[in-house]
C-alpha cells in the first residue's frame, strides 16, 4: 500500500505540473483513501498535523502533516462569534490570561489568548507571538511550551493566535499556500495586524517583539518574520520549514519528506532553530534550510558544541556569528527527539520533556536581540 500511495502522489505531482488540477486532485484523493483517510468526495488540500500522528505516507497520528479535506467556504455564512465573557482582574502579583479577537467575526478574523504579566503598565515589556501547530489551540500550546510560566517570572507578554477551523479543518496555519506567504495579504498580514493591535492596547516595547512557532506554526513564524522584519526583532522556528518551502500540495509533501527543492526566501532577522533528528514528520533538512534562509542576516563564522542538560537528550548547537562577532543564528539539533517541542511539558500535546528547554533557549536568544535599525520591507 505504501508503494501505491507514493506512486499516486508522484502522479499527482506530474499532473499538477502539467496544469491538470482536477486529475491531480483525484489522484491525491485516491492516495488518501488508500492511506486510510477517506475524503468523502470533498476537495482536498494539504494540512499539517504534528507528530506522532499520520503525516506523510508512512506516519501515524494527527498534527503537522495530514492531507485533509477543505471545502470551498466562500458561500458559507460567517459564524456569529459571541463577545468574550467578562474577565476577572488578575490576582496581585499574578499574570492574567485573557481572550480577545482581531479582525471581526468573519473568516478574516481570529480569536487569541494573551498573557499579561504582573507589573504590566509599569514599563514597556517584550512581546512574544506564539504560533501553535496543527490540532492545537492557545491553551494547549501555552501548557506544552510553559511560556506563560516563563513570562510570569521574567515579565513579558505572550500572544497566542488561534487558527480557525473554517480556515483550516485541522487548525493548521496555511504556510504552504502562496496567498499566505507574503507581506500585505493572507495570514501573515492578519497576524502582523493582530500584533500591532495588541501593541496599541498594551505597554509593549516595539524593539522587543518576537515570533516563534511549532511545525506548521514554525513555518508560518518564518514567513511572518520574513514579511515583516521591521516588526519582529527575531524568530524561533521549531520543527518547521523555510519561507517559501512549498507553493502547493505536491511541493509541501516533498518539502516535509526530504526538504524543499526550491531556494528559500530570505529571512532577514536573527533566527534560532530547534529540530529533532528523529523527526519523521518534517525532515531535519528543513531546519538547515531555515538557517540558510537566515544567512543574509549574518553568519560569517560557525562554531559547534555538544550539550547535555540534567541527563536529558544530547543536542548539537551551531552558533553563527556575523563579521562583528555578534551571534546572528543558532541551530539546535536535538538527538533522538521526534516531531515535538523540546523540553516541553507533558501537560500539552506534541512535547518532548527529555529534550533541552527550547522555550528558555529561545527567550535567551530573543532578549539578546532587540531590534536594531533595519530597513522595512517593501
Image (cartoon, rainbow, N blue to C red):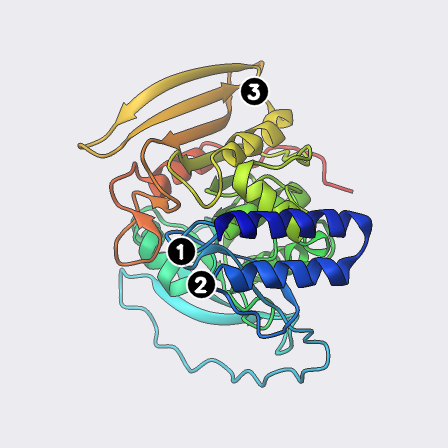
Q: Are marks 2 and 3 in contact (CB under 8 Å)?
A: no
Q: Do the residues labelled 1 and 3 touch (CB within 8 Å)?
A: no
Between 333 and 24, which is closer to the camera in this rendering?
24
Q: What element carries label 3?
A: loop
Q: Is mark 1 on a helix, strand or loop?
A: loop
In primary-sequence order, the first of circles 2 and 3 is: 2
Q: Nearer the viewer, mark 1 or mark 3?
A: 1
Residue 292: percent from left, percent from top? 59, 27
Residue 135: percent from left, percent from top? 44, 63
Q: Name the residue under label 1.
A: 53
Residue 357: percent from left, percent from top? 31, 39
Between 21 and 133, which is closer to the camera in this rendering?
21
Q: Are marks 2 and 1 in contact (CB under 8 Å)?
A: yes
Residues at marks 2 and 3, CA–CA distance in whole angstroms: 35 Å
Q: Mark 2 points at which residue?
A: 135
User: Residue at image x 36%, y 49%?
Assistant: 155
The quadrant holding residue 295 is top right
Amino acid at each position: 500500500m505504501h508503494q501505491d500511495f507514493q506512486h499516486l502522489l508522484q502522479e499527482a505531482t506530474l499532473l499538477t505540473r502539467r496544469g491538470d488540477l482536477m486529475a491531480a486532485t483525484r489522484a491525491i484523493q485516491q492516495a488518501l483513501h488508500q492511506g486510510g483517510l477517506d475524503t468523502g468526495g470533498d476537495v482536498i488540500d494539504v494540512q499539517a498535523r504534528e507528530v506522532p500522528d499520520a503525516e506523510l505516507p508512512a506516519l501515524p497520528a494527527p498534527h503537522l502533516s495530514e492531507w485533509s479535506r477543505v471545502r470551498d467556504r466562500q458561500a458559507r455564512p460567517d459564524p456569529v462569534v459571541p463577545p468574550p465573557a467578562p474577565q476577572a482582574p488578575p490576582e496581585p502579583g499574578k499574570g492574567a490570561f485573557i481572550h480577545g479577537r482581531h479582525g471581526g467575526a468573519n473568516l478574516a478574523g481570529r480569536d487569541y489568548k494573551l498573557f499579561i504579566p504582573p507589573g504590566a503598565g509599569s514599563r514597556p515589556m517584550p512581546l512574544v507571538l506564539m504560533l501553535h501547530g496543527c490540532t492545537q489551540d492557545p491553551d494547549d500550546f501555552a501548557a506544552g511550551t510553559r511560556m506563560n510560566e516563563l513570562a510570569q517570572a521574567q515579565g513579558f507578554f505572550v500572544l497566542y493566535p488561534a487558527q480557525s477551523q473554517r480556515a483550516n479543518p485541522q487548525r493548521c496555519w496555511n504556510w504552504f499556500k502562496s496567498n499566505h506567504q507574503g507581506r500585505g495579504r493572507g495570514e501573515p498580514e492578519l497576524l502582523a495586524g493582530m500584533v500591532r493591535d495588541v501593541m496599541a492596547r498594551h505597554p509593549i516595547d516595539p524593539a522587543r517583539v518576537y515570533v516563534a512557532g511549532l511545525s506548521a506554526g514554525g513555518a508560518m513564524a518564518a514567513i511572518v518574520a520574513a514579511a515583516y522584519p521591521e516588526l519582529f526583532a527575531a524568530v524561533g522556528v521549531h520543527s518547521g520549514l523555510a519561507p517559501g518551502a512549498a507553493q502547493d500540495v505536491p511541493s509541501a509533501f516533498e518539502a516535509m519528506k526530504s526538504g524543499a527543492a526550491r531556494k528559500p526566501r530570505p529571512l532577514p532577522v536573527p533566527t534560532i532553530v530547534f529540530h529533532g533528528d528523529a523527526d519523521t514528520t518534517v525532515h531535519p533538512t528543513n531546519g538547515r534550510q531555515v538557517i540558510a534562509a537566515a544567512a543574509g542576516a549574518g553568519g560569517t563564522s560557525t562554531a559547534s558544541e555538544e550539550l547535555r542538560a540534567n541527563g536529558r537528550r544530547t543536542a548539537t548547537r551551531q552558533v553563527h556569528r556575523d563579521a562583528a562577532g555578534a551571534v546572528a543564528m543558532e541551530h539546535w539539533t536535538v538527538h533522538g527527539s521526534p516531531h515535538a517541542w523540546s523540553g516541553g511539558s507533558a501537560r500539552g500535546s506534541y512535547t518532548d520533556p527529555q529534550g533541552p528547554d527550547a522555550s528558555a533557549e529561545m527567550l535567551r536568544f530573543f532578549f539578546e536581540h532587540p531590534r536594531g535599525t533595519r530597513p522595512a520591507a517593501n
